[in-house]
């Protein structure tokens, strides 16, 4: 064996580090309070910033007078949209969604119009927080209040107030002649829908709604930024991508990219919500005027009103099947709320809606609709959970109607290798059937239910992505190594990077220190999102380690005065295969110590654009008990089964599955944006926006199925997003089982369950 | 506005600082004393990320004013590891992978220690209800609860040995 890893390893036992559960390298910092998150940075001479936000969901800005605020002692800068370039539309790809730079700029600071309650209109930097807050009160904004619309279906009405007066729906032929709030129509179809439904012996159709929900990261957005008189800028911020922050700051402020350096803070949760910027360009604009570093930190109220969330939706699903359970046709129409600017995940929802199933005839239509609510941001498998809630609910009804086991009907119709996915490509190395089988065979699935309890099953799909990543590996003189990436570590990815490098080098994971570097210290990397980091950045890390091993082998060959083809790398040492030489193996540490005499420092950097991310599938089983007096739904048992390709660090893979399931349970049972008639959010705090707490949940059993992805050196597939796709439907299907009737409108909160029980008599 | 002079003990050490009347103890710890282990997740006592001990009582430091700390004994996450070693709770959090982003972790650890100080043998349900004031969005709590109960078992064993 001369090459360590040049083809996928299918057999686990060969691996010494991958698949083990070492303590994460950044762990001690995080259990001792040392880890520095966005709000923990402090610079000499730093000013405190505050943002003035619109109290109206829709209004024209008639005038903004900042004279009094600027005159207040201690105020060093006040900015409005006039301090930012008025940009043209330009699409920019970042991770899992594209952003229009003009929309992004208008979202960061409103110009001419405010489009939601909480929309930023001005910002202040002052010598203290109290002065900054006082200054906000001195800014005089004159608004002409306009009628507003927050609901996605109402926003589609021809009589709804228009957010963007010139917006013509894209994706419709011929283009509409009148503007509307419908930004885009997506369509996907196959076969003959009419013939498919004609062949059906049972047809089930139902309509579903879900409410906007927030990613709910516990760390509010925060940054410190500084700009010198010649435009040299440094930003410390908590985000899912320091390069994303750099690009957006440069675009929004008209700076050279090379003049902006972004230093990633630890990130206190993102889930997609930190794949864009809100504060960083504002802090830089304030610093440009004041000449001092400026810190901006959001309150929780600001996080709810002005960042995230994901779309509220209205979805109709119709599926036909034969008596033996084979699907003959499916029709889906989905309406997704985009918030103030186009860009809901309706397109991804159209692609994922039927991705789990083999269907000859289908039609899926999606609508991206703007509303007077915060501009939606990515949230874990963007768009997929809501449409899965609807599709998996109808499949559950079909199974009930036909008297077929809910897992069996999914096994019968579920996709397999070689089938053409509903969204285009042909599936290879997928593990949906294996995942269904593992769920069916799990003891949970056959465990008896207590009287009054219900059990629900649902499946979920996510593409997973690859993309651009850079990694560097530097060997130190004592044989230890540093692995440097540009991918923020949200949930333990530093550990997997160190483990993959260690596996290739043939050393223990504790000999490799992983570092997440700033934008000036490592090559470009797309943000952490789309479940791409362990796959794509992991691939760059693996290749960098392989290059280092090649260099080590060459140096051993030089030492032994033989050809590199006569050197093998095994267990962290070079072995001579040349029968003419009688030499001892050279260890990594010996070769590293001797580097100066064999050609200098041993380092490698790899930049790549990873392709071939393997799609992921999950199947969740949920048991619920319902308190018929209060309407409270208790989750009594939960099992989440998922194909993970190969788990690099199984404990953190389980963590992704458990965390995703918990977020989905919150979405199903309690979480929702509540808007008053005045268009303002009524529950912009954690007391009223009710995320799951420890006492709301049981243990969540994560079951990992491993169908390796041959395109990754160790077989990894993305794992972070799939687990939030099935829970909405799994919970709702369980509630259906317990109640005897379906509730199709989330959340299934106590008042709604109580009302449904009253209606059902 | 003139500032108030405050004297207290933090993690066993005497401290003195100046704070505006309306400043929260959380802001004073973070901005005046440089102890940034306690985090602000909500500022309204709902998330528990700012949990500290004041005279052996678990409090949200965002709900307490800095001047109220006068003469008090305060313990923060920075004081949990002693004599160059981690507290068993900290060690178990690492072994069980009970953190992902780590932002809620200091508050969870302080709250979990408060639980074990008064109830060395909590049930899973007791642990879940005690920690219901500490939001974690990453883990789904599974590994957190396991880590706390495992630490409790280890501490009981050490105590009886």
Image (cartoon, coloured by chain):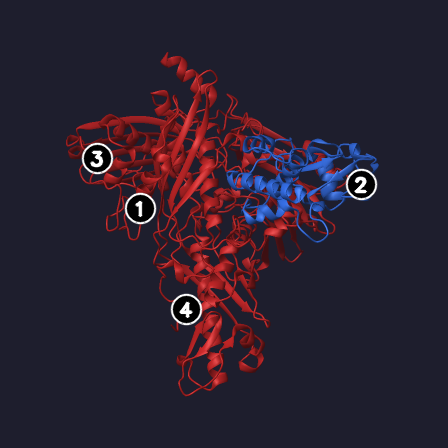
Q: What residue would you read off at disc 4?
A: A4
For residue B160, the mark is none
User: Residue A645 at what x, y percent from top left?
Assistant: 37, 52
Q: Mark 3 belongs to which subunit? A: A
* Above or below, B112 relative to A557: above
Q: Looking at the image, is mark 4 or mark 3 earlier in the sequence? A: 4
Q: Mark 2 belongs to which subunit? A: B
Disc 4 to disc 3, how far (Cα)?
A: 48 Å
Disc 1 to disc 3, how far (Cα)?
A: 24 Å
Report helix, strand or loop for mark 4. loop
Q: Residues within 10 Å of mark 3 (few under 14, many from 20)?
A: many
Say if labels 2 and 1 share a chain. Answer: no
Q: What residue would you read off at disc 3?
A: A329
The answer to whether residue B114 shows anywhere in this view is yes
Q: Mark 1 belongs to which subunit? A: A
Q: What residue would you read off at disc 2?
A: B9
Report helix, strand or loop for mark 3. strand
């Amino acid at each position: 064996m001369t090459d360590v890893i040049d083809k996928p390893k299918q057999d686990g036992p060969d691996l010494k580090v991958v698949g083990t559960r070492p303590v994460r390298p950044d762990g001690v910092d995080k259990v001792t309070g040392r880890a520095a998150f966005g709000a923990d940075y402090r610079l000499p001479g730093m000013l405190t910033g505050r943002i003035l936000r619109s109290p109206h969901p829709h209004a024209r800005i008639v005038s903004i007078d900042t004279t009094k605020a600027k005159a207040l002692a201690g105020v060093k800068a006040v900015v409005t949209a006039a301090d930012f370039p008025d940009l043209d539309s330009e699409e920019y790809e970042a991770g899992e969604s594209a952003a229009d730079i003009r929309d992004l700029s208008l979202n960061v600071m409103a110009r001419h119009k405010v489009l939601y309650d909480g929309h930023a209109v001005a910002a202040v930097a002052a010598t203290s927080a109290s002065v900054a807050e006082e200054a906000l009160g001195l800014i005089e904004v004159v608004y002409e209040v306009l009628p507003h619309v927050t609901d996605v279906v109402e926003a589609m009405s021809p009589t709804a107030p228009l957010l963007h007066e010139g917006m013509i729906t894209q994706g419709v032929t011929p283009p509409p002649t009148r503007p509307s709030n419908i930004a885009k129509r997506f369509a996907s179809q196959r076969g003959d829908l009419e013939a498919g439904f004609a062949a059906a012996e049972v047809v089930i159709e139902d309509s579903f709604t879900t409410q906007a929900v927030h990613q709910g990261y516990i760390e509010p957005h925060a940054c410190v930024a500084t700009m010198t008189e010649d435009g040299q800028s440094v930003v410390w911020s908590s985000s899912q991508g320091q390069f994303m922050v750099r690009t957006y700051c440069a675009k929004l402020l008209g700076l050279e990219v090379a003049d902006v350096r972004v230093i990633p803070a630890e990130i206190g949760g993102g889930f997609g919500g930190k794949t864009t910027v809100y504060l960083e360009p504002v802090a830089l604009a304030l610093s440009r005027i004041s000449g001092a570093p400026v810190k901006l930190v959001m309150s929780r109220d600001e996080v709810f009103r002005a960042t995230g969330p994901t779309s509220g939706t209205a979805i109709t699903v119709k599926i036909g099947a034969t008596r033996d359970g084979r699907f003959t046709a499916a029709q889906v129409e989905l309406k997704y709320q985009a918030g103030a600017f186009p860009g809901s995940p309706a397109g991804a929802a159209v692609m994922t809606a039927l991705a789990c199933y083999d269907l000859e005839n289908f039609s899926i239509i999606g609508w991206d609709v703007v509303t007077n609510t915060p501009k939606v941001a990515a949230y874990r498998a963007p768009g997929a959970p809501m449409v899965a809630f609807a599709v998996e609910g109808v499949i559950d009804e079909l199974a009930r109607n036909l008297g077929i086991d809910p897992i069996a009907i999914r096994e019968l119709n579920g996709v397999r290798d070689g089938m053409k996915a509903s969204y285009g490509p042909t599936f290879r190395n997928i593990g949906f059937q294996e995942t269904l089988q593992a769920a069916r065979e799990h003891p949970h699935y056959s465990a008896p239910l207590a009287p009054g309890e219900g059990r629900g099953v649902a499946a979920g799909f996510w593409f997973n992505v690859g993309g651009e990543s850079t990694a560097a590996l530097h060997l130190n003189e004592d044989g230890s190594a540093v692995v440097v990436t540009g991918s923020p570590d949200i949930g333990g990815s530093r550990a997997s990077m160190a483990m993959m490098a260690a596996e290739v080098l043939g050393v223990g994971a504790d000999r490799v220190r992983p570092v997440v570097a700033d934008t000036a210290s490592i090559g470009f990397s797309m943000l952490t999102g789309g479940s791409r980091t362990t796959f794509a950045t992991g691939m760059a890390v693996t290749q960098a380690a392989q290059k280092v091993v090649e260099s080590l082998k060459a140096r051993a060959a030089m030492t032994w005065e033989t050809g590199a083809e006569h050197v093998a790398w095994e267990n962290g040492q070079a072995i001579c295969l040349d029968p003419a030489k009688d030499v001892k193996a050279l260890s990594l540490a010996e070769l590293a110590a001797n580097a100066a005499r064999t050609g200098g420092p041993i380092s490698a950097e790899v930049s790549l654009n990873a392709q071939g991310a393997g799609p992921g599938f999950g199947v969740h089983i949920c048991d619920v008990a319902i308190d018929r007096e209060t309407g409270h739904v208790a989750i009594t048992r939960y099992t989440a089964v998922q194909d993970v390709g190969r788990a690099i660090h199984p404990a953190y893979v389980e963590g992704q599955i458990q965390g995703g399931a918990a977020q989905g349970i919150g979405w199903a049972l309690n979480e929702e944006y509540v808007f008053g008639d005045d268009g303002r959010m009524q529950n912009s705090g954690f007391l009223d926006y009710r995320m799951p707490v420890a006492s709301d949940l049981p243990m969540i059993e994560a079951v990992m199925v491993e169908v390796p992805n041959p395109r990754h050196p160790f077989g990894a597939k993305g794992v972070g997003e799939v687990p939030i796709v099935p829970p909405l439907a799994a919970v709702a299907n369980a509630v259906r089982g317990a109640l005897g009737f379906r509730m199709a409108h989330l959340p299934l909160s106590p008042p709604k369950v109580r009302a449904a029980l009253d209606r059902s008599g | 506005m003139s500032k108030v002079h405050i004297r207290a003990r933090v993690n066993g050490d005497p401290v003195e600082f100046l704070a505006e009347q309306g400043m929260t103890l959380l802001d004073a710890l973070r901005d005046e004393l440089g102890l940034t282990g306690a985090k602000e997740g909500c500022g309204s006592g709902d998330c528990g990320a700012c949990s500290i001990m004041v005279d052996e009582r678990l409090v949200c430091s965002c709900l307490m004013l800095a001047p109220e700390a006068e003469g008090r004994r305060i313990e923060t996450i920075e004081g949990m590891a002693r004599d160059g070693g981690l507290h068993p709770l900290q060690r178990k959090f690492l072994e069980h992978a009970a953190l992902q982003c780590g932002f809620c972790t200091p508050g969870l650890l302080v709250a979990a220690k408060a639980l074990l100080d008064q109830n060395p043998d909590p049930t899973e349900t007791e642990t879940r209800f005690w920690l219901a004031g500490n939001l974690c969005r990453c883990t789904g709590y599974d590994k957190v609860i396991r880590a706390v109960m495992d630490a409790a078992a280890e501490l009981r064993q050490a105590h009886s040995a």
